[in-house]
Amino acid sequence: MTYLVPDMISATLGLAVYLLGAELNTQVGFLRRFNIPEPVSGGLVAALAMLTLYLTTGISFEFEMETRDYLLVLFFAAIGLNARFSDLITGGKPLALLLVLTLITIFAQNGIGMLGAVAFGFPAQSGVLFGSAALIGGHGTAIAWAPEVGAVTGLDGATELGVAVATLGLVLAALVGGPVAKHLVERNNLTPDRPTEELTVGVPTEDQRDPEITPIGLMRVMLYLHLAIILGYGANILISEAGLKLPLFVPCLIIAILIANLRSWMFPDAVPVSRTPALGLASEFALGAFLAMSLMSLQLWTIAELGVTILVVLVAQTAFTVVFVIYVLFPVMGSGYRAAVLAAGFGGFALGATPTAIANMTAVTKRYGPSPIAFIVLPLVSAFFVDIANAIVIQTIVNF
């Protein structure tokens, strides 16, 4: 039996799950040492509790998620307000390199997925559901492509398969980024290029009560965030009417970048909004609550019902991702601190979703120091490039 949980209760539970994760990270040294984000710690405990309830009683819950969707666009608007045109110019080369590495990952994931599918008796084309359609593409891409995969291959339950792979991938994504970054940072004694700069997301772990965060400052930040969302929403309508479909957070991110840079140019003496502790706090709240709500709503029993095949293939996918980010992405991106932060983010992005990647990078930067360009480069890759490249590759494989 499934019960529908109203949005307000879902949001409230999300806050409770986040605080549970914060307490777990305080009490369990392992979680802190390996940079596991607080919403991940709490969200996985909540998801496991839901799994136990379902297996013992058959009861499950479906959560309304309007507030979660709002928190996502609020978070990306905050990322945009922190961006400087100078950083975007500096990030041109890393952006290009990351695009190439992402394309390589898409091909590799589908190769591993197809090998796994054939080894366990699935049609070869269904390998995309063990690969980039569900992993680097996430739940939305898996659901979108599953009916076509099912129609071409005759595979029953293609949607359930894609959702299950995407779900477990999200869990793995939340767990691998922090340990990878810890390994790279501490093995190479890496430090930030600009250690005194404000964090893009959050406030430093050792300074959770920053005196510069005031009610007026926080209200000012929220005003500009909502202005970016309103204008981004309008821009998204125009983009849709032009025949191009983008996630809402993309135009919100772009509008926020324009607002931040035009404001500093037109009103250089205005009270700052970008790179302020108040903006860092607002972005961390939005991301933390979003991720806590996402993870607590995972239906882990869909994975259990589909058995060993998914686990074996995803162990292989995770092993590839870890090896790739340590021995390929890290040196290609320069072997510096920014490369280590991007490695944490790319691990979350390749196996899960952009918010998971940002959460991984946030946990790392809160501990070791800021890396603002990383927070611009990775969302741009995931927002503009992945869906197009992924669609071309998936379409080619499915129709082969």
Image (cartoon, rainbow, N blue to C red):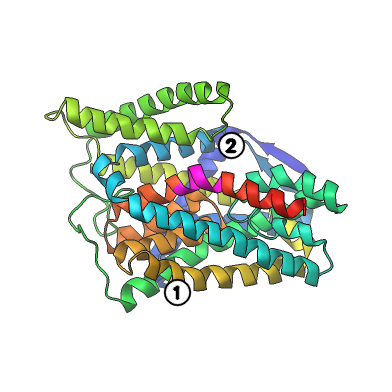
Query: In the picture shown, does residue 361 fall above or below 66?
Result: below
Which label sits on residue 65? Answer: 2
| Residue type at numbered disc 1 | Tyr
Q: Report whether 223 appears left or right of 233.
A: left
At 33% from the left and 71% from the top, the residue drawn is 185
Quarter-wise, where is residue 312 in the image? bottom right
Please state, as top left, top right, bottom left or bottom right, where the N terminus lies in the image: top right
At 68% from the left and 41% from the top, the residue drawn is 62
Residue 85 visible, this orientation? yes
Q: Identify the residue position indicated by label 1 in the image.
A: 327
Judging from the image, what secondary structure is the residue with disc 2 in? loop
Question: Where does residue 124 sit, x and y in percent of width and height?
Answer: 79, 62
Classed neighbour count for the residue bearing mark 2: other residues with Cα under 10 Å, few (<14), some (14–19), many (≥20): many
Query: In the picture shown, does residue 248 fall above or below 148?
Result: above
Q: CA distance from mark 1 to mark 2?
A: 38 Å
Q: Report whether 350 appears left or right of 114.
A: left
| Residue type at numbered disc 2 | Met
At 62% from the left and 33% from the top, the residue drawn is 6
Quarter-wise, where is residue 180 in the image? bottom left
Question: Where does residue 126 sit, x and y in percent of width and height?
Answer: 77, 57
At 75% from the left and 47% from the top, the residue drawn is 146
Please state, as top left, top right, bottom left or bottom right, where the C terminus lies in the image: bottom right
Q: Report whether 296 appears left or right of 354.
A: right
Which label sits on residue 348? Answer: none
Q: Residue furthest left?
A: 269
> Which residues, given as a range, are shown in magenta?
381-387
Front of the two marks 1 and 2: 1
Prevalent SS, magenta region: helix
Disc 1 + disc 2, Cβ < 8 Å = no
Residue 31 visible, this orientation? no
Classed neighbour count for the residue bearing mark 1: other residues with Cα under 10 Å, few (<14), some (14–19), many (≥20): few
Q: Residue furthest bottom?
A: 187
